[in-house]
Image (cartoon, helix red, strand yellow):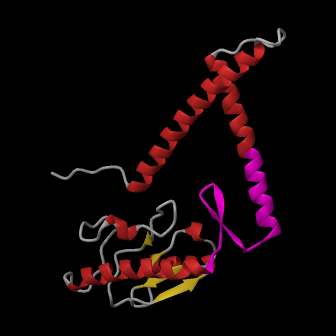
Amino acid sequence: MTVYGLRDAYRLRFEDISFFILLLVLCAFGLQLLWNYAAKGFSFLPRLKFLQAGALALLLGLVMLVILTMISGIREVLTPEAWRRQGTSYRLNDPAQEPARRRSLEHLRGALFQYTLTHEGRFPKNDFTPEIPDKLWEAPDQLGSHYIYVGPLTTNQPQALLAAEPPNFGDGRFILRASGEIEKLSNEEIGKLLQGNSKP
């Protein structure tokens, strides 16, 4: 009997949402206490109920989200190519991270080619094969993004795209060919390779 659970990325998202709901409740409770304490000295201020305080806390949070998003957008415009989008925020393109990104893809390459040794030169049909740990499919970013995998392929298709970093790594992304070669290509070049893989 096989038991399937939530993937790590979904589990982390669920934990984040739960944390923010708890934080919202605490903020609403604190806002209600502070407002009602201040209302004692000002007769013209109405007393807040918990739901009203929750709505006010949510509204203030949305306003802050809009402001922070505008700041991120302006920063991207003023310093183009220095930042890459990751989720709902931007991260600095740090060249010092490239060795770690390459090493992560090398670990995945090792597991994939080890798989071909026992499967007549064939790579896995998909990225859910039990022979390769889920951790190897995760790219080295804070979100635990999943590598893009193209299958099924064989070692007789050396120039075909086997795996690639997800789009949130920006325009310069590392890819793994079926030959085992690792390259850094633009999104446009990766798109052409994916189209080439899809052709019979």
Q: Position of residue 129 (x, y in %)?
A: 27, 67
Q: Nearer the viewer, residue 72 or 130?
A: 72
Residue 126 at x, y percent in the picture: 33, 68
**Quarter of the rendering occupied by the C terminus:** bottom left
- The answer to if 76 sits in the magenta stretch is yes
In front of the other: 195 or 106: 106
**Rendered image quadrant of residue 136:** bottom left
Q: Is residue 116 left or right of residue 94?
A: left
Residue 200 visible here: no
Question: Which image quadrant is residue 114 in?
Answer: bottom left
The structure residue drawn at horizontal position 52% and vertical position 87%, both measured from the top left corner, is: 183
User: So how many labels did they put on this image?
Assistant: 0
Residue at the location (19% across, 53% down)?
A: 2
Query: From where the camera sits, is residue 168 visible?
Result: yes
Q: Is residue 51 above or below residue 194?
A: above
The reply, left or right, for residue 5 in relation to residue 84 is left
70, above or below 94, in the image: above
Residue 45's x, y, as percent? 80, 13
Q: Which residues are magenta?
A: 66-95
The question of residue 98 being in magenta is answered with: no
Residue 105 in the image: state x and y as whole percent: 43, 79
| Picture layout, residue 86 above or below residue 169 | above
Taking the image as shown, residue 4 lies to the left or right of residue 47, namely left
Q: Residue at 70% x, 27% y: name it.
A: 56
